[in-house]
Image (cartoon, grey):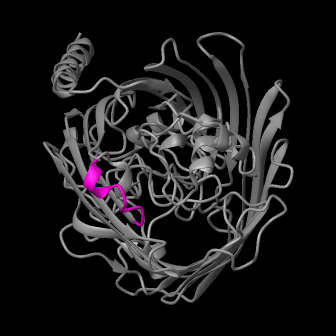
């Protein structure tokens, strides 16, 4: 009954808000419903030509989560002749298409509909606001049980210059992230006030490498400064759009070629930015993240290939907050990804990654060898029906540490990839995991989309941790009490299973709303870890755990507004 009351309250609040917004709109707009985006309405990427934007928006593979709704593109005869020139094809797999660069809410000033700005094609601008209300019941990320009702607020603004000063260009993105009505201590996943997530300059040589065989410019781009971006399938480098705060880096990035070309090479050397919540963020000068990513799109109608190498090198911080921070580490990861379609039969997306290296503790002089692997497989089919139903099957694997005493670390490291698509509740990520899933989405109308998912979660090694439960590794604010790992393996390997549902409604091309719900049913591992932890009810001092079943409920309502 309590769940129904909260659900009803969220729906009524959303209806009231959306109704008031619709009334305020003074111009009717045409909506065209397309496949999935994570949390934003797709706004044409100003870095691309008009023809390429039309091609990307009109393809049926703009997937990040639910079917998204975008403004209907009008294609004239001239653009139609150019539409097929790009080699780029987006993946149909769930939540794997990177955010555009610059982000989707950014537009040319000439495109905002103000006559006096019609000639400002060289200036990029953007304003965005997002509000999300969450209801969490007995959240197992926390040692405390009970209910929580946080409200997350995020504001973004962008300004950038291109073309007019070529080869010099720059971009600046401001973000303010806050949480209110939260019963827990705010973390850097929730709060990061008045900061910059992008602040870079770049040299852009439009025809630096000539043109490809479709006569498309093959540029050279060299970027230096602070940057937040996504690439490949977002599993290792991501902005983390669901989260209230954003991953960012400082360093350099060199691109040879671009998305539309038949091949592209992305080289980078970056230091991750530490989110300091109420102070200006700063780079982590003890950690370098580097790599090279190739894109081969010559056969993109069938397959796009992405071979890559990524690595990390960390110098131990004696005062580091976590155990990992206090280690000298070096990880090297070769990997590849392939995605595409087999005619109209099905689409696919597969990847494999292997990690080698070492971890060294300067205090104990102990060294362990890194040997881990991770892979993903997804196959889906869209059926011929007006509602465009799509059925997908997914399996993801990431190794865990098989034996904490054998001098070898088998735990896979996700680097700086996304978290949410692995688990809507944020209970698991791309480490120590076996995750089969089935998913279906469909769109009854142009404005309305649904998604249903059922997932099962197992630990790849029952002697390693389950990442984000019982205050384990959730933030850099509270010390990890160690309740999320059983080194003996006696707690089992079944973490639990979950039902996830989402409803997306597009109010206008610039305003979208999402209502979601997840029920997680705890497996043996979660139940046993709660039972084995000291109980607050029996008088144990902090840290202690509110003993409970481990089953959880998560409901949220989100509104995203692009203001330009």
Q: Residue at horizontal 41%, vertical 41%? A: 40
Q: Nearer the viewer, residue 314 or 176?
A: 176
Q: Is residue 559 above or below residue 545?
A: above
Answer yes or no: is residue 141 visible.
Answer: yes
Q: Residue at horizontal 19%, vertical 19%? A: 19
Q: Residue at horizontal 62%, vertical 46%? A: 433
Answer yes or no: is residue 266 visible.
Answer: no
List x then y, in percent, for residue 387: 58, 12
> Which quarter of the figure is the N terminus placed in?
top left
Left or right, 305 with reference to 508? right
Residue 479: image quadrant is: bottom left
Q: Which residues are magenta?
A: 114-122
Q: Is residue 232 above or below residue 203?
A: above
List x then y, in percent, for residue 152: 23, 45
Left or right, 380 with reference to 47? right
Q: Main secondary structure of the magenta part?
A: loop
């Amino acid at each position: 009954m309590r769940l129904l009351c909260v659900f009803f309250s969220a729906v009524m609040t959303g209806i009231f808000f959306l109704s008031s917004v619709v009334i305020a709109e003074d111009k009717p707009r045409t909506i065209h419903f397309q496949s999935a985006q994570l949390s934003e309405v797709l706004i044409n990427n100003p870095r691309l030509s008009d023809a390429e934007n039309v091609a990307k928006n009109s393809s049926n593979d703009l997937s990040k989560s639910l079917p998204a709704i975008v403004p209907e593109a009008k294609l004239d005869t001239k653009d139609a002749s150019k539409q097929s020139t790009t080699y780029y094809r987006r993946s149909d797999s769930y939540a794997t298409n990177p955010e555009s660069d610059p982000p989707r809410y950014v537009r040319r000033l000439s495109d905002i509909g103000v006559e006096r700005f019609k000639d400002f094609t060289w200036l990029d601008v953007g304003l965005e606001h997002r509000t999300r209300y969450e209801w969490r019941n007995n959240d197992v990320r926390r040692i405390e049980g009970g209910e929580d009702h946080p409200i997350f607020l995020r504001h973004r603004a962008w300004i950038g210059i291109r073309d007019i000063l070529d080869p010099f260009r720059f971009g600046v993105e401001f973000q303010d992230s806050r949480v209110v009505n939260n019963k827990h201590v705010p973390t850097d996943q929730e709060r990061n006030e008045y900061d910059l997530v992008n602040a870079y300059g770049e040299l852009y040589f439009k025809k630096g490498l000539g043109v490809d065989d479709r006569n498309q410019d093959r540029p050279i781009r060299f970027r230096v400064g602070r940057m937040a971006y996504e690439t490949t399938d977002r599993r290792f480098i991501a902005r983390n759009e669901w989260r209230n705060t954003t991953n960012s880096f400082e360093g350099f990035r060199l691109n040879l070629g671009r998305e539309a070309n038949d091949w592209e090479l992305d080289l980078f050397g970056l230091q991750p930015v530490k989110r300091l919540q109420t102070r200006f963020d700063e780079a982590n000068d003890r950690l370098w993240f580097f790599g090279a990513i190739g894109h081969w799109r010559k056969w993109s109608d069938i397959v796009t290939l992405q071979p890559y190498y990524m690595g990390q090198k960390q110098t131990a911080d004696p005062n580091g907050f976590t155990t990992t921070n206090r280690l000298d580490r070096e990880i090297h990861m070769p990997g590849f990804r392939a995605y595409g379609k087999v005619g109209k039969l099905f689409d696919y997306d597969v990847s494999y990654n292997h990690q080698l290296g070492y971890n060294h503790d300067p205090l104990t002089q102990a060294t362990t060898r890194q040997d881990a692997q991770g892979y993903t497989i997804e196959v889906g089919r869209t059926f011929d029906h007006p509602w465009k139903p799509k059925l997908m099957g997914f399996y993801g694997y990431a190794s865990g540490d098989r034996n904490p005493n054998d001098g070898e670390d088998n735990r896979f490291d996700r680097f700086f990839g996304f978290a949410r698509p692995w688990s809507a509740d944020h209970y698991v990520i791309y480490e120590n995991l076996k995750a089969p899933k089935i998913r279906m989405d469909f769109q009854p109308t142009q404005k309305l989309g649904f998604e249903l998912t059922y997932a099962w979660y197992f630990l790849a090694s029952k002697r390693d941790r389950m990442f984000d439960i019982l205050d384990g590794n959730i933030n850099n604010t509270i010390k990890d009490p160690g309740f999320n790992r059983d080194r003996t393996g006696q707690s089992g390997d079944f973490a639990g299973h979950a039902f996830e549902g989402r409803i997306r409604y597009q109010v206008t091309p610039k305003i979208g709303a999402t209502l979601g719900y997840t029920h997680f049913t705890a497996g043996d591992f979660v139940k046993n870890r709660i039972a084995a932890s000291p109980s607050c009810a029996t008088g144990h001092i902090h840290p202690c755990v509110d003993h409970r079943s481990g089953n959880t409920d998560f409901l949220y309502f989100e509104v995203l507004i692009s203001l330009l």
